[in-house]
Amino acid sequence: MDAEGRRDSTVAISSDRGKSFQPRVHWGGAHWKIEACPLKPTALAVDGSTIYAAAFDGGAQPQGASLSRSLDGGRSFEPAVALHPGAGVSDAPVVAVLAGKVVAAWHAKLEGGERHVFLATSVDRGKSFARPVDLGAGMYPVLAVRAGGLQLAWQQGDAILSRFVAAGDPLLR
């Protein structure tokens, strides 16, 4: 929390394997004032000097899963882009970069129903995202880049499900 009572995510970059860090920088979402400890993680992906940060944007109206980017190696971040503005609730975003495409996944509730996992891609380095694709019931997705594509996993009830998404899969277009 800063001196003004904001609980914003910040990013600090190290270029010497963690011996020192640049000053912390606001991640790009709207400032969030909340009298609680929100326990909302920030996910990062790096592509050269571009850094992508995905987080729950509690200061936005409406609140929800968002993504911002730094084009200068983490010295500053652009304003965050909402990943699913039409969702009643969207949260737990994660991000990866595969073959120049930015891929985001999160869970959302539509019209009071159960949570579903969604995925969207950006071909303009995170400025905008394609329409979200509903992958079915689930929550708390994770992404990992691996040879030839992405591994996507999520929680569904008391099970963990996993799916490999090949680089050429229509989901990533």
Image (cartoon, rainbow, N blue to C red):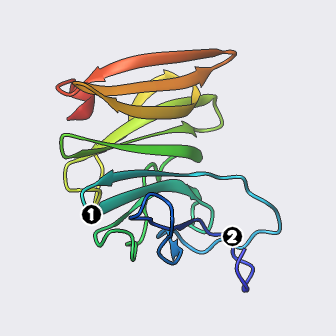
Gap in angstroms between the C-alphas marked 2 and 1: 26 Å
* Residue 77 position in % (x across, y down): 40, 72
Give the residue displayed 20% in from the left and 35% down from the top.
Answer: 173
Single out the mark in the foreground, 2 or 1.
1
Q: What is the crowding at mark 2: few (fewer than 14 residues within 10 Å), some, or many (at least 20)? A: many
Mark 2 vs 1, N-terminal side: 2
Q: What is the crowding at mark 1: few (fewer than 14 residues within 10 Å), some, or many (at least 20)? A: few
* Residue 130 position in % (x across, y down): 28, 45
* Residue 141 position in % (x across, y down): 52, 32
Image: 12 above or below 93: below
Give the residue displayed 42% in from the left and 26% down from the top.
Answer: 152
Image: 88 above or below 124: above
* Tag 2 residue: 7
Task: Please say whether residue 126 is visible from this viewpoint.
Answer: yes
Task: Using the image as rendered, state which of residue 114 and residue 16 is in the foreground.
Answer: 16
Give the residue displayed 50% in from the left and 31% down from the top.
Answer: 117
* Amino acid type, callout 2: Arg
Task: Using the image as rendered, state which of residue 151 and residue 130 is in the foreground.
Answer: 151
* Tag 1 residue: 49
At mark 2, the secondary structure is loop
* Residue 89 position in % (x across, y down): 60, 46
Task: Please say whether residue 65 is visible from this viewpoint.
Answer: no
Give the residue displayed 27% in from the left and 29% down from the top.
Answer: 171
